[in-house]
Amino acid sequence: MDSREDILGRIRQRLGRTAANADSGRAGVAAALKARVQGPRPPAGPDLLARLRERSELLSSTVDVVPAVAQVPAAAARYLREHALALRAVCVPELAHLDWAGAGLEVAARAAREDDLVGITGSFCAIAETGTLMLCSTPDSPATVSLLPETHIAIVDAQRIVPGMEEAWQLAREHFGDLPRAVNFISGPSRTGDIEQTIVLGAHGPYRVHLILVTG
C-alpha cells in the first residue's frame, strides 16, 4: 500500500465508508456539488475582453489582438522579432495546422523539451476577473509546452473569455465530464518573492507570457 492509499483509507475509515454504502456516499457528494451556491462576487463589467487585457497586463503579460486565427502566426513572429528572440518554437499538436512557416517561423508540434525556448499553446478559456488562462492537458495539448520554455505564447479565443473562476470550472465540467489529468491556471509570468521579498520573474516557469486574443 502506498502513501496515497494509506491516507485515503484512513479518511474512508473515519467517514464510515464501506463497499456497501460507497454508492450512496458518491451520490451525496454529487448532490452537494450540484446544489452549490455562489458567494458574493465583484462585477466583471460588460467588456470581458477589455477586462482580461487590463488584468493580464497588470500581471506583466503582454497582449496582442488579431481579428482571425489565420493571423496568429504573423502575430507570434512579430512578437518574437520585437523581443529579439529566435524564430523557433514548439507548439501543442492541436495548433500544427496553422501556417507557421509562412510567417517565417520554425515550429515543431510536440511536447516541450528542456532546450525549447518558446512554447505556443491554445487555452481552454480565459478568466476576465483575474487575467488568468485556464489550460487543460490532453494528448493534443501537453502541459509541458506552457511550463518548460522561457517564453509562453498563448492563443485565446475571445468567445472563450468568461467572467470568473466559477464559469471556467462549469465550462470544464460540461466539456470534459471527468476532468483531464492536469488543469493549469496561468496568471502572468512565473514569479517568486522568496528572496528578500523581491519579485523575480521566471523562477518556476516562463518569464514572458504573451497573449494573442482572436476576436473573429
Image: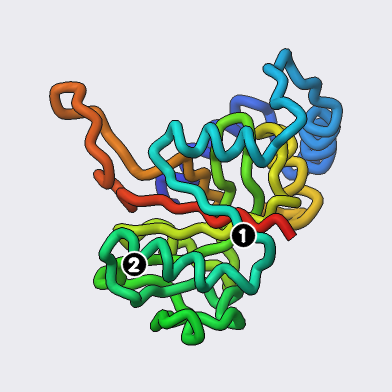
Identify which residue, 21 or 197, lies in the foreground. 197
Is 133 on the left-hand or right-hand side of 168?
left
Identify which residue, 146 or 53, lies in the foreground. 53
Residue 205 visible to an observer of this rendering: no
Q: Residue at x 80, y 25 (%)?
A: 36
User: Where 140 sits versus 171, above or below?
Assistant: below
> Which residue is disc 2 drawn over?
81
Quarter of the rendering containing residue 46: top right
Q: Residue at x 56, y 31 (%)?
A: 130
Location of residue 209 in the rendering, given as x and y in whole percent from the top left corner = 41, 51
> Which residue is disc 1 drawn over?
66
Q: Residue at x 50, y 48 (%)?
A: 63
Residue at mark 1 to residue at mark 2: CA–CA distance: 17 Å
Residue extending farthest left: 196
Residue 73 visible to an observer of this rendering: yes
Location of residue 115 in the rendering, given as x and y in whole percent from the top left corner = 25, 72
Instruction: Give the mark nearest the N terminus, 1 or 2.
Output: 1
